[in-house]
Image (cartoon, rainbow, N blue to C red):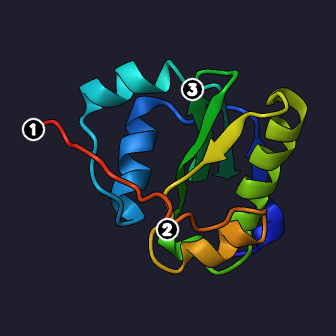
């Protein structure tokens, strides 16, 4: 499997591919209903395609002015470890540099060792000053 065959497109996957790729990448599942509602609010998203199939994704959500959140970075496990996360982040960061106004805050939640990837793009840990908190609707 040659990484050169992977195409980056500036559009986010549809809800079915989104749910599938989250599951394959070991991320917490989202319902199809939640995906249909939420993905419509994506500010910018990218997909990695191999022979037309989605093998990677990432998106930016937020209010478009003050706050932006990098979210849903995922790569199919068969393609991990080949720099594709960097391709996704590079595309999202290029969009943010062009579209986020000065004083905007860009945040993300880094799972495990992914924090090392995000640090390469200028993200810093904010603990103990602030901590990520979440509430999940059941």
Q: Circle 3: is it few (<14), some (14-19), or many (20+) Cα within 10 Å?
A: some
Q: Residue visible at 58% across and 68% down?
A: 125
Give the number of the mark in front: 2 or 1: 2
Which numbered marker is on residue 58?
A: none
Question: Earlier along the polypeptide chain: callout 2 or callout 1?
Answer: 2
In percent of width and height, residue 108 lies at 55, 52
How far apart are labels 2 and 1 at the CA level? 28 Å
User: Label 1 belongs to which residue?
Assistant: 138
Residue 119's image quarter?
A: bottom right
Q: Is residue 135 left or right of residue 115?
A: left
Seen at 68% across and 72% down, the residue is 117
Quadrant that contains the C terminus: top left
Q: Mark 2 — residue?
A: 127
Judge from the rendering whether residue 54 lies leftward or rightward of residue 117; answer left or right: left
Which callout, 3 or 2, points at the residue further toward the start of the chain? 3
Residue linked to disc 3? 42
Residue 89 vertical placement versus 13 (above, below): below
Helix, strand or loop status at disc 1: loop
In the picture provided, is 82 more to the left or to the right than 107?
A: right
Can you give x and y, in whole percent of width and height, for residue 44 in the image?
A: 68, 30
């Amino acid at each position: 499997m040659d990484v050169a065959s992977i195409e980056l497109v500036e559009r986010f996957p549809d809800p079915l591919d989104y749910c599938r790729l989250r599951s394959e990448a070991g991320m917490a599942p989202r319902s199809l209903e939640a995906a249909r509602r939420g993905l419509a609010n994506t500010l910018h998203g990218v997909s990695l395609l191999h022979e037309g199939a989605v093998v990677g994704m990432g998106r930016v959500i937020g209010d478009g002015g003050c706050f932006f959140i990098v979210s849903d970075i995922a790569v199919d496990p068969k393609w991990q470890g080949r720099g594709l996360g960097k391709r996704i982040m590079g595309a999202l960061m290029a969009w943010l540099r062009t579209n986020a106004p000065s004083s905007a805050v860009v945040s993300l939640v880094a799972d495990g060792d992914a924090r090392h990837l995000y640090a390469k793009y200028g993200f810093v840990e904010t603990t103990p000053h602030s901590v990520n908190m979440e509430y999940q609707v059941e």
